[in-house]
Amino acid sequence: MTTSRRGMGELEAEVMAILWDADEWMTPRAVLERLDSDPPVVYSTVMTILRRLWKKGMVNRQRLGKAFTYHPVKGEGEQTAERMTELLDAADDPEGALTHFLAGLDAKRRRQLRKLLERGRT
């Protein structure tokens, strides 16, 4: 019998996507109900993931009765941009990394990037 395993951080990414989509404070139960995961996860796993995200500073939490509710600290775009900057800063050859990144962009994304860069010049 083969068991499929998630890659490191996949479940955290799925939970963050749910929180960003909801744009409201969510309980672990509400996150679990929206989580379409294979293999399925249990409530305690979702609680663990949310607690880890809170300890990493990626989500805020507040008490609601006996439970906690969670909400992202930053929006998805801001979080992605920070991660991209961290990766670029960590590269031995940032110019080479940018060159490879740009080479991988399709024409539509290149146009979007050009527009953003032009806007930044004013």
Image (cartoon, rainbow, N blue to C red):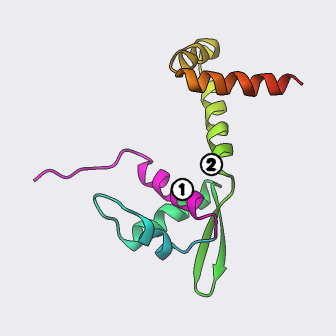
The three-letter amino acid code for the residue at tag 2 is Glu
Which badge, 2 or 1, is on the more N-terminal residue? 1
Q: Looking at the image, which residue is at 67% across and 25% down?
A: 113
Q: Looking at the image, which residue is at 58% across and 86% down?
A: 66
**How far across and down, in percent of the image, does residue 87 sit?**
60, 29
Rounded to the nearest angstrom, the CA distance separating label 2 from label 1 is: 8 Å
The quadrant of the image that shows the C terminus is: top right
Residue range (magenta): 1-24
* Residue 38 against residue 106 in the figure, above or below: below
**How far across and down, in percent of the image, does residue 43 sit?**
40, 73
* Residue 39 against residue 94 in the figure, above or below: below
Q: Looking at the image, which residue is at 33% across and 49% down?
A: 6
Q: Are marks 2 and 1 in contact (CB under 8 Å)?
A: yes
Residue on which disc 1 sits: 16
* Total marks in image: 2
Element carrying mark 1: helix
Q: Is residue 84 magenta?
A: no
**How far across and down, in percent of the image, does residue 17 sit?**
52, 55
**How far across and down, in percent of the image, does residue 28 sit?**
50, 72
Of 109 and 68, which appears nearest the observer? 109
Indicate the quadrant where residue 97 lies: top right
* Residue 67 against residue 61 in the figure, above or below: below
Element carrying mark 2: helix
Q: Which mark is residue 116?
A: none
Q: Specify the farthest residue to the left.
A: 1
**Left or right of residue 103: residue 35:** left
Residue on which disc 2 sits: 76
The three-letter amino acid code for the residue at tag 1 is Met
Q: Specify the farthest residue to the right.
A: 122
**Left or right of residue 83: residue 5:** left
Indicate the quadrant where residue 38 lies: bottom left
